Amino acid sequence: MLKPRNPNGLSRRSFLKTSAAGVAGAVGGNSFFINHAWAQDVVWDGEPFDAGGATLRLNEWGGFWEEAQREAIINDFEKTFNCTVAYDSAFPWFPKYVAGGPQNPSHNVGNWNLNEIIKLNRIGDFFLTVDEMKESIPNAADLWDFAFGSGLGATWGFGQYAYAYRTDLVNPAPTSFKDFWRPELAGKRATYITSNGLQQVFFMTAAAEWGKDQYDMEAGFEAMRNAMPMKISDFTGNMQTLVERGEVEMGVQWEGEIFLQMDKGIPVAPFTWERKPILTQTLSVSRYSDPVEKKLALAYVNAKLDPEYQTKMSETFYLRPTNKKSVLPELLTNKGVKNSGDALDGLWIPDWNWYLDNEDDIVETVNEIFSS
C-alpha cells in the first residue's frame, strides 16, 4: 500500500512538519507562556520525592515488553514516587507528539529507536539535550560514550543488525551481506514493511553495499527489486515465527531475537553485517513538560540507566547494556558479547537526515516493489 497523501497535495510527512511548525509558532508567539511553569529550570537531585499522585505519560513498546517494564521498574516506581505511569504502547507516537507540539508534549518520557527521535528533532525543540539530561540523571555518568552518540537522548540497550538464517536449510552459511540475494533464497527471504526502522536501515545498507554509497537510492531500489519475491514482515516477533516455521530461511533481524531462538533450540544463527549499524533503545525527556512530570521523567530515565536494570533486560531481551557497571549474563557472554567501550569500534550510523529528506520517494517506490 502506498503512503497516504493529504488532499492538498502535501505528503503526510510534509503535512506533519507544517502542522508542527504552525503549532510551535503559535505557542511560541504568545507572551503568556513566558511565565508558564515549564519555562522554569527543573533539576532533580537523584532522591525519591512525593509527586502527589501526578501522572507520568510514557511511550514504550507493548506486549511482553510492557509486562517486563512493569515488573522491573514501573510497579515500584509508582509506589516510590507516589505517581501513576500512563503507558502508551500504541505506536507510532510521532503524530501524537506533533499534534500537541513541543510545548504541549503528548508524553513526558519516551523509549524509542533512533529514527523517530531524529525525525521529531528536525521539526521542533521537543527534547532535552544530552548535556541537560546528564545534569540531572546520576546514572548517566556511568554510561559508555557511545550511549550519547545521537545527541538527543540516552541509549540504555542495543543490539547489532544481522541476518537470521536457518542453519539446517541454508548451505553454505552466509559470509556476506549480499548473500541475502542468493537465487536459491527466492521466496524464502524476508524483510519488513517500510514503516519499520529495520527495513529503513536494510535499505540504506543495501544502497551502500550494491551502489556507490548509502545515498545511491537507485541502487537501493534495484536491490529491493532483485530480492523479490520475498516475504514482508511487520515486526521482529513475526519474523521469528516465520523463521521458526521454516517459511523464511534468511531474514533481516537484530541479534537479540536470534540469540533467544538459539537458546530455545531452534536451528538458527546470526550473520552480523560487515557494516555495523545497531538497533537502539534510546530514552528522551520532553523539554516542556510541567515541573513535576519532568522530574518524574528524569527519575524514570535514571532507573533505566541503572546497571542492575540493564543486566535484567540483558537476561530478558538479550540487549547489550550501555552502563559500564552492568554485568553481562552468561546467555550473552557465551555468544562472545562483551560490555566494553570498544565493543562497537567501527560502528556505522546511517545518515538519518538524508533518509528523512527522501523518505516519501523511498517509501512509495519500495511499497510499489513489494506489492508487485
Image: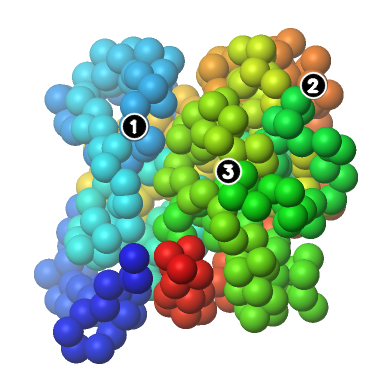
Report whether 15 appears left or right of 259.
left
Q: Which of marks 2 and 1 is nearer the N terminus?
A: 1
Q: Which residue is drawn at 70% across and 64% down?
A: 206
At x 66%, y 12%, the residue is 265
For the residues bearing labels 2 and 1, Cβ distance under 8 angstroms: no
Which residue is the site of mark 3?
280
Residue at image location 80% in from the left, 15% down from the top:
334
In-image side of 358 versus 188 (left or right): left
Label 1 vs 3, first from the N-terminus: 1
Please state which of residues 154 and 360 is positioned toward the viewer in this rendering.
360
Percent across and percent down for residue 80 are: 31, 15
Residue beneath label 1, please? 62
Q: Where is residue 154 in the image (x, y as percent from the top left)?
A: 55, 43
- Image height of 111 relative to 73, above or below: below
Structural distance between the alpha carbons of marks 2 and 3: 19 Å
- Residue 288: name its quadrant: bottom left
Residue shown at 70%/62% (left/top)? Answer: 205
- Label 2: which residue? 335
Find numbered disc 2 in the image and state the secondary structure of the residue it sits on. Answer: loop
